[in-house]
Image (tube, rainbow, N blue to C red):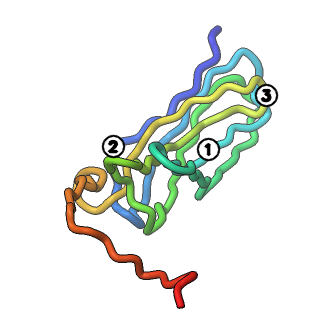
């Protein structure tokens, strides 16, 4: 048998503070000892990368196959967004303790029906410094 992990969700876009309900399923060659589900976000693009795990759930398992329902109240922020320089994405990751198998599903969390789009603003006006360091 191949090792399999699956996250079953009714949709992939959610509103902030919405309750996400789903089900995890697994079929492994050997009992995984425990199954871990994490909800987290990360940034991609220019500059330093940021990431954070917001929620973690864990279930002990002595069975080689099974399923488990779950629900997570999603955080208010940060929103999923797509920008010209940086993007913020959310995902659920399912992994086993024994065997090191994993499976992830990207989701988005934002008002409306999609991640927030941050358009490039073409501003050719000169910028003035608000700092006066080194000036007397």
Residue pointed to by mark 2: 11
Residue placed at 64% from the left, 8% from the top? 1
| Relative image position of residue 37 (x, y in whole percent) | 61, 44
Left or right, 19 with respect to 135, comes to left
Callout 2 touching callout 1 (CB < 8 Å): no
Residue placed at 40% from the left, 44% from the top? 107
Q: Secondary structure at mark 3?
A: loop
Residue pointed to by mark 3: 98
Disc 2 to disc 3, how far (Cα)?
A: 29 Å
Residue placed farthest to the top in the image?
A: 1
Q: Residues within 10 Å of mark 3 (few under 14, many from 20)?
A: few
Q: Is residue 4 above or below residue 40?
A: above
Left or right, 52 with respect to 77, comes to right
| Relative image position of residue 35 (x, y in whole percent) | 69, 38
Q: Secondary structure at mark 1?
A: strand
81 or 118: nearer the viewer: 118
Residue placed at 27% from the left, 55% from the top? 118
Q: Is residue 98 above or below residue 50?
A: above
Could you tell me how many numbered marks the image carries?
3
| Relative image position of residue 106 (x, y in whole percent) | 44, 39
Left or right, 10 with respect to 114, comes to right
The label shown at residue 7 is none
| Relative image position of residue 4 (x, y in whole percent) | 59, 20
Residue pointed to by mark 1: 37
């Amino acid at each position: 048998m191949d090792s399999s992990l699956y996250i079953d969700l009714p949709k992939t876009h959610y509103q902030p503070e919405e309750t996400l309900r789903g089900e995890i399923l697994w079929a492994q060659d050997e009992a995984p000892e425990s199954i871990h589900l994490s909800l987290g976000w990360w940034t991609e693009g220019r500059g330093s990368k940021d990431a954070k795990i917001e929620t973690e759930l864990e279930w002990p398992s002595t069975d080689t196959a099974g399923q488990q329902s779950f629900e997570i109240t999603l955080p208010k922020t940060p929103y999923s967004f797509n920008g010209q320089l940086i993007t913020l994405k959310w995902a659920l990751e399912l992994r086993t303790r024994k065997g090191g198998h994993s499976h992830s599903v990207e989701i988005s969390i934002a008002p409306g029906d999609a991640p927030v789009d941050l358009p490039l603003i073409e501003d050719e006006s000169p910028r003035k410094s608000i700092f006066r360091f080194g000036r007397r």
